[in-house]
Image (cartoon, rainbow, N blue to C red):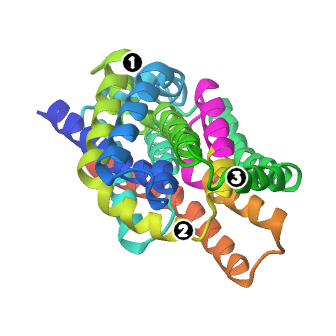
Amino acid sequence: MIALFALLAALFLAANIGANNAATSMAPAFGAGLWSRRRTLAIYAVAVVFGATLASHAVIRTLGTELVGGAIYEAPYLLPVVLVVAGICLLAANLLGLPVSTTHASVASIIAVGASVGSVREEAVLRILVWWAVTPLAALAASYLLGRLLYTRLLLTLYRLRGRKGSRRAFSVVITITGAYVAFSAGANTAANSVGALVGGGLFASRDAAWIAGLAMAAGGLLFGGRVLDTLAKKVTRISLARAVVIEVVSGTVVLVSALSGVPISLTAVVTFSILGLRLARTAAAPETEKTVPRILVAWTASPSLAFLLVYALIALAR
């Protein structure tokens, strides 16, 4: 019964992750009116399933077996605790409109389980924390450099193509490919957030868990991603499509490299700092940026801290 509840919690978490990732990945293409909402979400669904099934195994292994000792999952109530707390953090973030990462909450929840029984592997935790600090800065630096060196050339090329026969179709292909690339990378990196604990608990093999997560994320995007996509697409209209291409290429690459390296990172963090880097390359930091960045940093710190404390407290009460 507890195993069934853990599976349902994992599906629910994966579906919510999928809905959020759909907007992050495909908002530029949808906001530009290149595809209908249904077709946009269909493209996302296919890409995220491929990403989860083909490239998520290293991250699933990290969260399932390498971050903490496998013995911690012998107590049956631990699996749903990890998943439910991560889901609560995601729900709270959505309600408050905060760019909180489910990756941060999921990793912190698993670490809390390990800490409660003295089974945390410090080297793995330190490795993840270093990647969490470095990857947003890498995205910022890459976007800044591309903004300085290549953005003007890309913009001029798009202006030359404007009005030519077939130019809209060509650009539709480019922005769709970059969006699908981000969706693929997101599937590869974030699938483990929902099923890593299931693999660690021995309920599923990594391959089967990857399919479960990928299909649930795709379903979440198709069923619940539309509203989030509509909302984010309105904000993306403030970003030119040329900038969107740069942001998606940088973000997708950083997230995919992390997935292949077996490190779960935040897609939200990478995209946010990529946008900031490109903005800094074109203009000085705006006043709203100076207010927004500290707010985001506080949210990213609060999310794993809250998840850790909740899981640790629940385990203590259950004993």
Work out which quarter of the rendered image holds the N terminus and state it.
Answer: top left
Is residue 265 rendered to the left or right of residue 21? right
176 above or below 313?
above
Distance CA(mark 1)–CA(mark 2): 39 Å
Q: x, y (%) of residue 288?
A: 67, 81
Q: Residue furthest bottom?
A: 287
On residue 237, the disc is 2
What residue is rendered at 56% in x and 37% in y?
Answer: 264
Work out which quarter of the rendered image holds the C terminus and state it.
Answer: top left
The earlier-in-sequence mark between 3 and 1 is: 3
245 above or below 64?
below
Please tell me whether mark 2 sits on a helix, a strand or a loop. loop
| Residue designated by label 1 | 206
The residue mark sitting in front, 3 or 1, is 3
Question: Which amino acid does the dot numbered 1 rest on?
Answer: Ser
Distance CA(mark 2)–CA(mark 3): 17 Å
Distance CA(mark 3)–CA(mark 1): 43 Å
Tell me where residue 199 sits by quadrant: top left
| Residue designated by label 3 | 158
Res. 216 in view: yes
Question: Which amino acid does the dot numbered 2 rest on?
Answer: Thr
Q: x, y (%) of residue 129?
A: 67, 44
On residue 191, the disc is none
What residue is rendered at 64% in x and 66% in y?
Answer: 297
The residue mark sitting in front, 1 or 2, is 2
Please tell me whether mark 3 sits on a helix, a strand or a loop. helix
Question: Which amino acid does the dot numbered 3 rest on?
Answer: Leu
Q: Which residues are magenta?
A: 249-269
Label 1 crowding class (10 Å Cα cut-off): few <14, some 14-19, many 20+?
many
101 above or below 253?
below
Callout 1 touching callout 2 (CB < 8 Å) = no
Label 3 crowding class (10 Å Cα cut-off): few <14, some 14-19, many 20+?
some
